[in-house]
Image (cartoon, rainbow, N blue to C red):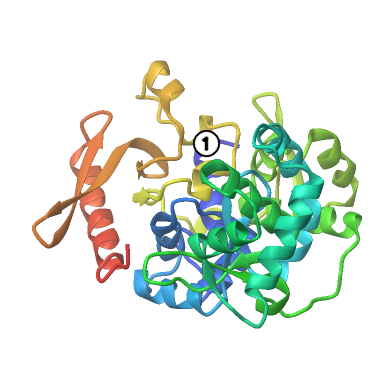
Amino acid sequence: MTHYEILSHRLLNQQIISTKFTKPEEIVRWMVAMQSQEYAMAKWAIGLRLPGFNDADIEQVFNEGKILRTHLMRPTWHFVAPEDIRWLLALTAPRVSAINNYQYKKEGLDASVFKKCNEVVVKSLEGGKFLIRNDIKAELSKNGIEADGVRLTGIMMQAELEGLICSGPRSGKQFTYALLEERVPAVPPMTREEALHQFLNRYFVTRGPATIQDFCYWSGLSLTEARAGLPELSKDFEKRQIDGLEYIFLPQDISVVPKTLPTFLMPDYDEYGMSYKNKEAITDSEISKKQISEISSSYHMIISEGKLAGTWQKAKKGKSLEVETSPYTPLIKRKEASLKKAVLKFKAFSQNTTD
């Protein structure tokens, strides 16, 4: 399997070449979870996969609660579908909490403090209230709980990981919190084994070809946990050794993929880059080893014909939005023309942006 074939499968599975979906929430549900600490870029990650929708459209869906934003999998924000939030938290929150424990202790946050904080947070949000972080901070302060800076972040993240709170609609440009039980309809619970089975299968369906190491890098689960679930993978998956690594994927017809792979402005922390520990498939051979070592595949990257090719950034010129591009190497005319189209696509999505 060549890098072209690997990327063709991934671009199809991640809905970037084309999509069968018609709603932003369907994209998020398909992707299982989408990293979203950079909120504006996370909306663009959906827009990249859903032609015809703009920033304001996705903002509306988020405010309606059809897409949620919370901490899970790794100690960072993710978009997630309401029907998936509970089992994802149950499966991944223990490991995130373990990672956070050092910082919790540093801030004087232990089980007894969290219990008191959670009681205040729940009481302040009961009855369908949506509160911004400063409002919750004020409620904690009224109850004699110090909650500033990193300490407040720890308090709120722990409440998210416990499944007590999740995102509410935005208030202007500020995020609000809501009680998860009031925001999200109940769904049948899953056992841990059922959740792990679903997690693994949906990862390889949406991101294959990928390795089990890629899955662990993306999911935050340990290699031991992941390997325990491998026997339950669907028999439809194929496994293939590539450069000494075992890749798992669903066989599909990639003849529908254009010979020239897509060019686009990759959103920060996009799943096309963040879903894989091994970045070799998306690094162009023309890029030096030093440049590859500096690539985080997370921040304002240009994807040219499926591969990392440089960086981009937004720039304001008066009231208009402009995009500055910085390819690593000079682009041939075909690639330059594709990049210009990619810039226009991003600018069209960003009209009337709320961020």
- Residue 130: name its quadrant: bottom right
Q: Is residue 298 left or right of residue 229?
A: left
Q: Is residue 59 above or below residue 35?
A: below
Residue 331, percent across and down?
A: 22, 36
Residue for badge 1: 3
Residue 295, percent across and down?
A: 43, 29
Give me the residue at 25% from left, 67% from top.
348
Can residue 83 be seen in this snapshot? yes
Q: Quadrant of the N terminus?
A: top right
Can residue 6 be seen in this snapshot? no
Q: Quadrant of the C terminus?
A: bottom left
Q: Is residue 311 above or below residue 343?
A: above
The number of callouts visible is 1
Q: Nearer the viewer, residue 86 or 54?
A: 86
Residue 312, percent across and down?
A: 28, 42
- Residue 167: name its quadrant: bottom right
Q: Is residue 188 left or right of residue 132?
A: right
Disc 1 is placed on an element classified as helix
Q: Amino acid at mark 1?
A: His
Q: Nearer the viewer, residue 90 or 17?
A: 90
- Of all residues, the one furthest to the bottom in this rendering is 127
Q: Is residue 180 above or below residue 336?
A: below
